[in-house]
Image (tube, grey):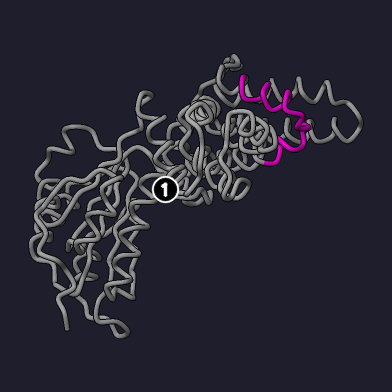
Amino acid sequence: MPAPFAFLPTVQLRPNQIHTHLAKGLAPLYLVAGEEPLLMQETLDAIRAAARKAGFSEREVLDVERGFSWQRVIDACASLSLFASQRIVEVRMTAGPDDEGRKMLQALAPQLQRDTLLIVVCGALDKRQREAAWFKALDAAGASVYVWPVKTEEFVPWLDARLKAAGVQIEADAVKLLAERTEGNLLAAAQDVEKLKLLFAGERIDAEALAQAVADSARFEAFDLNDRLLDGDAVGAVRSLQRLREEGLSPLEILGALSWCLRSLSKAAIHNTRVRDAATALEMAGVRRFQQAKYLKALPRVRPGEAMNWMRRIAQVDQMVKTGQDAAAWEELLTLILAASGAAPRPTRT
C-alpha cells in the first residue's frame, strides 16, 4: 500500500497556494487559522477533498468547548478504526488552545501515526500565539495556513482571479464595478461570481451588463446588511438598508434574512447568560461555524432583554406591511437596525 503522505518540506502557506501544495501530496498535519471565514472554509474543503482522494474515508470531528478533555485528541489519533485504514481527526476551536491543549498538541505533533491526518482549526490568533511553541510544533510537523483578511488594495486582484477560476469572461471595468458593490465582503463576492457564471455562460461581461445583473441580485445585499450590523457598523448598515430600498425590495424581503440573524444573536445572548461562554452559546443557538467570528464580535454588546425587544420590533414591521403601512415599516426597520448595531442610545439602568 502506498504511503499516505508525501515527504513535503514544512511550510507556511497562503490560501491561494493550497491547491498547488496538495497536488504534490498531503502533509500529515494541517493547522488552519485566521480571520476570513470563507477562505478558511475553502482551504479546509480542499484539504478534506485531497485526503478523501488519498484514501482517508473516515473523519472524526472534535469541537473544543468549555471543559473539553484533550485526552480525546490523543485517543482519537491513537485508536484503530473499524471501518477505514486511514482517517482524519479534525480538532476545531473558535480561538486558540488553552494551556492543556497547547502542551498536548506540541507533544502530539511529531508522533502522529501514518494512518492519521490531523487537522487543527482555530480562529484569529495574535502574533504571540503565532510565535508560540505549540504553533511552531504543528507547523514543523506538517503545514500551516493562516488566513489574513483580504486588504483593500488586494480585493480587485483577488476578485479578478476568482472570476477567471470560475471561467467568467469579464472586462476590467466590470470587475471594478463588482468590487465596489461587494466592498470587501468576500462571501457576497463569491455568491455574485457564481451568479454571473450561470447568467453569462460563454458570454463576455461588460460594465453595463454587470450593472443590470447586480440590480437583479439585490437579495445579496440583505446578507451584507447583516454583516455590517454584526460588526457594529451602523453607518454601513443604514447605507445597505437604503440601497435595498432603492433597488425595490419590500421590507418583508429584507426582514427574512434580518430576523434570522437577530433571532440567532438573541438566542446566543440568552444562552450566554447561563453558560458564560460565548463560543458554547453560539453553538447552542445554532450559529454556523463559519459565521461565528462575526457573532462573537457582536455578542458582548447584546443584553438579553434588549434582544427580545428586537424580536418585538420585527413582529411590528411584519404587521405594518400587512396592514399597508410601508412607510412606517421602513422607519421601524431603520430604528431596529440602529439599535441592533449599537448606535441607538440605551435606556439607563435604575
Image quadrant assignment for residue 245: top right
> Can residue 181 be found in the magenta stretch?
no
Picture coordinates of residue 37, whole percent (x, y) = 40, 43
Question: Which corner quadrant holds the N terminus?
Answer: bottom left
Picture coordinates of residue 134, whole percent (x, y) = 13, 48
Give the residue displayed 24% in from the left and 81% down from the top: 85
Q: How many marks?
A: 1
Picture coordinates of residue 343, whole percent (x, y) = 56, 17
Picture coordinates of residue 231, whole percent (x, y) = 48, 28
Task: Look at the numbered disc 1 and give the secondary structure of its residue.
Answer: helix
- Label 1 sits on residue: 165
> Can residue 241 be found in the magenta stretch?
yes
Answer above or below: position of 4 versus 297.
Answer: below
Image quadrant assignment for residue 310: top right
**Side (left or right) of 34 relative to 74:** right
Which amino acid, mark 1? Answer: Ala
Question: Which corner quadrant holds the C terminus?
Answer: top right
Image quadrant assignment for residue 74: bottom left
Give the residue displayed 43% in from the left and 44% down from the top: 164
Answer above or below: position of 310 versus 271.
Answer: above
**Side (left or right) of 315 relative to 162:** right
Residue stretch in magenta = 239-256
Q: Nearer the viewer, residue 73 or 294?
A: 294
Q: Main secondary structure of the magenta part?
A: helix
Question: Label 1: few (<14), some or many (≥20) within 10 Å?
Answer: few
Give the residue displayed 18% in from the left and 38% down from the top: 129
